[in-house]
């Protein structure tokens, strides 16, 4: 059985083809004509099913076949995850038109469904929480799950207490206990948590009320500011791309980097007591796997844990970047969300 896996971004399309669980084809298409180009690439493949990474699943806690009812739920996510859910829905609709095979949704929120209520609740009146299903859902769950499983294989031992750091254009940090997510930095939407490329991360909600009043801004305009004009871009006043900021020596770029690393360290530090210690810290996604200086800056806050960074391994982006005598192991693992989606798709169809 050939499974096509699609991981759709706002301006690119990651795809992979698996024959059962064996990868046979993988690639990235930039731009808006991704699926049309992909049809040409797949002309010699007989696709039996398509697995999609879907960002927001609300209260759906496991992969499912995409029916009209499920698609209706996914559509609700456009308002909450505008950078992701709209292109995902377009891809699902085009796949229905082009391929006419079963389509399966694997949700980023699935992995975080184990977060306890006291960690996922927002302290607002119950009538709003209930009516709008407001709680901390968490995101990047497929990625966090994958790197956790890989870390166990690499270290060849069970890992009870792990902190996973997915740092890319979007960023989230997750506390994993006995293989289950117990807290994560993103919340009701992917906007909460860390400073990101163009997203603000955590912000005093009264700032928004203040700006709406004094700048006469609409909710839509506020949303655009927070999602597209904030984060590293706003602090540097130049770019939201960390690789460019790292090459710059001006004060604004330095401020953006320092603020980012400070927040990442603060989140990691806040998860150590709720885990009652930590066995391993994992860095994944493009920013984390290609920035030795950023990793070193973040980890410099945790010498008290007995973390002993091997600078040579860190500079080479090795898989394990700590010394053998380190009390906490730190790993750098390339994420592979597509393999998880393929397995879940195959499992559901069988």
Image: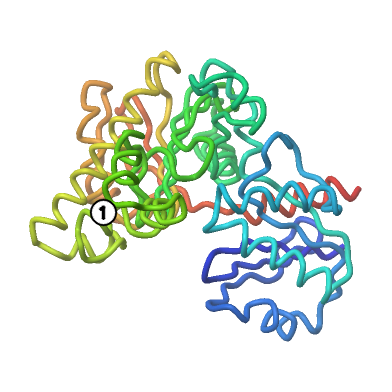
Give the percent coordinates (x, y) of residue 306: 26, 23
Label 1: element kind: helix
Identify which residue, 57 or 41, lies in the foreground: 57
| Residue at the (42%, 40%) spot, across then down | 165
Give the percent coordinates (x, y) of residue 178: 58, 22
- When the figure is inspected, residue 342 is found, relative to residue 247, above or below; the finding is above
Q: Which residue is mark 1?
A: 315
| Residue at the (30%, 61%) spot, across then down | 240
| Left or right of residue 151, residue 200 in this image | left
Identify which residue, 350 or 193, lies in the foreground: 193
Task: For the N terminus, give its image quadrant.
Answer: bottom right
Give the percent coordinates (x, y) of residue 188: 54, 36
- When the figure is inspected, residue 47 is found, relative to residue 88, above or below; the finding is below
| Left or right of residue 11, residue 300 in this image | left
| Residue at the (70%, 34%) spot, across then down | 59
Give the percent coordinates (x, y) of residue 192: 43, 39
| Left or right of residue 71, residue 9 in this image | left
Identify which residue, 307 or 250, lies in the foreground: 250
Quadrant of res 146: top right
């Amino acid at each position: 059985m050939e499974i096509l896996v699609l991981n759709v971004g706002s301006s690119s399309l990651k795809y992979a083809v698996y024959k059962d669980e064996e990868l046979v084809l993988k690639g990235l298409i930039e731009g808006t004509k991704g699926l049309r180009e992909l049809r040409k690439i797949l002309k010699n493949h007989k696709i039996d099913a398509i697995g999609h990474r879907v960002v927001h699943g609300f209260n759906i806690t496991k992969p499912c076949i995409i029916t009209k009812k499920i698609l209706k739920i996914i559509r609700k996510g456009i308002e909450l995850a505008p950078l992701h859910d709209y292109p995902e829905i377009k891809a699902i609709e085009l796949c229905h038109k082009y391929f006419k095979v079963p389509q399966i949704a694997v949700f980023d929120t699935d992995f975080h469904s184990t977060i306890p209520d006291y960690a996922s609740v927002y302290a607002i009146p119950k009538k709003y929480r209930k009516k709008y299903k407001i709680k901390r859902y968490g995101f990047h769950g497929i990625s966090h799950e994958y790197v956790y499983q890989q870390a166990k294989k690499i270290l060849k031992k069970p890992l009870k207490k792990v902190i996973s750091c997915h740092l890319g254009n979007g960023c989230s940090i997750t506390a994993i206990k006995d293989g289950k997510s117990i807290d994560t930095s993103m919340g009701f939407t992917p906007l909460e948590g860390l400073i990101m490329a163009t997203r603000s991360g955590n912000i005093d909600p009264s700032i928004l009320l203040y700006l709406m009043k004094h700048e006469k801004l609409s909710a839509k305009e506020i949303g655009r500011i927070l999602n597209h004009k904030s984060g590293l871009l706003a602090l540097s006043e130049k770019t939201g791309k960390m690789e460019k900021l790292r090459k710059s020596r001006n004060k604004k770029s330095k401020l953006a980097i320092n603020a980012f690393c400070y927040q990442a360290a603060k989140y990691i530090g806040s998860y150590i007591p709720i885990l009652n210690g930590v066995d391993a810290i994992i860095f994944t996604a493009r920013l984390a796997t290609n920035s030795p200086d950023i990793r070193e800056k973040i980890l410099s806050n945790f010498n008290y844990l007995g973390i002993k960074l091997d600078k040579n391994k860190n500079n080479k982006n090795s898989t394990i970047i700590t010394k053998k005598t380190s009390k906490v192991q730190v790993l750098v693992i390339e994420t592979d969300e597509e393999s998880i989606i393929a397995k879940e798709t195959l499992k559901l169809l069988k």
